[in-house]
Amino acid sequence: MSKVDSAGSGLAIIGWAVTSPFGIGRSVFSEGLAAGRFTERAIEQGQGPTETACLVPDFDSRAVLGKKGTRMMNRVTGMAVSTIGDLLRELNSDRLDPDTTGLVVGTTVGSAQSTIDFTRGSLTGERPFHVEPGLIPYAVMNGAAGQCAIWHGVKGPNATLAAGRSAGLLALNYARRLLLTGRAGTVLCGAAEEYSAARAWIAERSAGNDAPGAVLGEGCAMFALTGEPTDEPPLATLLAVKAMTCSDGDWYATVRRCTELAMAAAGVQPSDVWMASPSGAVGAGGQAERAALGDLFEVGDRLVSLTELIGETHAASGALQLAAVLSLAEQNPESAQRLAVVTSTDESGTVVVCLVRLS
């Protein structure tokens, strides 16, 4: 039995699961990633201002989870509940103590579609309170996290982080704090983002010149972290998560400084890094992010961005980046005991850097 030293060597990542435009599950994700398969496809007219998007193929909450309790469930909640179910099956959830298992879900605004539908009902109904009551749990930002906890019986700390593109990596940091302070023994954490007409219109109207032409995607990736003894070697070890704010427009300097702080906190060197994964954001932040990582690390073609393959997944992007790192590491023995850096930039000015040691 090995023991993870929370204060020194990091926290163990003992499982992961993913739902992406490649399909549902780790195997199709790994296959699509290895093949470099593009997932952009035509969508029905009226589903948004554009004609294409990167959608999880054939995903329907009722078909995946069953009809009970899913009549009004929105897409983001369905993906989160389903992905956590896959994760718990991988972990053999009988070993987990529900009372000490926490849950952290990153998001942008929850479900923009559910929120707008609920608001529209209040404005167009005969009375303001004549709304669809089934929408209420899903029209709030923490709806997905709450439903995941109820569905899977997770009774530990439950948190939702609304941080746009940075949400997935910040969720890892929140989980890290829960574990280091002893508030949970195991934490299920990650992020989810749905595609909807409402989100597509919001993205188009708010992007301005920052991300013109960005194809929207969707997905969910969830991870299990623990600081407790484990019977099996971890899949990876979370060493550090650092966040900074770019307040002066110098994205390159901020990304570089944040990355250097993460490495200093972990006590590692740039030569130890095997792979780097930038968010692939369109605009100045994303370009500077990729340039900074390319200058800091000699990773060659292992500077991997998912955006070209699965679209702009906003809140889910950091979690999906980490899933891609773990997937590629599983297929490359040379990655053993090397480091991977996952970064994110958000239009709000947030820069986050996550550092993991691969097993």
Image (tube, grey):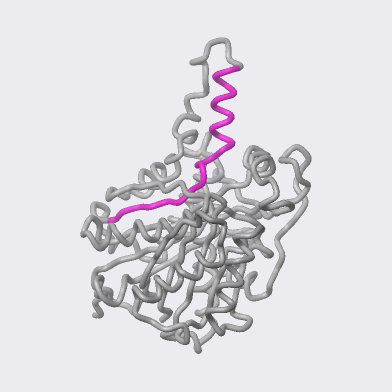
Work out which quarter of the rendered image holds the N terminus and state it.
bottom left
At a point 70% along the width and 68% down the height, the residue shown is 37
Region rendered in magenta: 101-123
Residue 298 counted in the magenta span? no
Q: Position of residue 184 (x, y in %)?
A: 25, 57
Q: From what the image shows, is residue 160 above or below residue 339?
A: above
Residue reaching furthest left? 182
Residue 34 appears in which quarter of the rendering? bottom right
- Quarter holding the C terminus? bottom left
Q: Nearer the viewer, residue 319 or 20?
A: 319
Instruction: Using residue 176 as the reference point, say whether residue 114 is left or right of it.
Output: right
- Can you name the residue that lies furthest to the top here? 126
Residue 48 sits above or below residue 295 on the image: above
- Viewer-closest of 28 and 207: 207
At a point 53% along the width and 49% down the height, the residue shown is 348
| 12 to the left or right of 3 | right
Relative image position of residue 136 (x, y in whole percent): 46, 29
Instruction: Place residue 186 in its image quadrant.
Output: bottom left
Residue that appears at 35% across and 52% down: 103
- Work out whether residue 286 can be spotted: yes
Q: Height in image: 272 above or below 93?
A: below
The x and y percentages for residue 118 are 54, 27
Q: Is residue 235 visible?
A: no
Would you say 95 lies left or right of 221 here? left
Please check the rendered image and state whether residue 118 is part of the magenta-colored stretch, yes or no.
yes
Say how many tags the image has: 0
Question: Residue 90: x and y, percent?
Answer: 41, 66
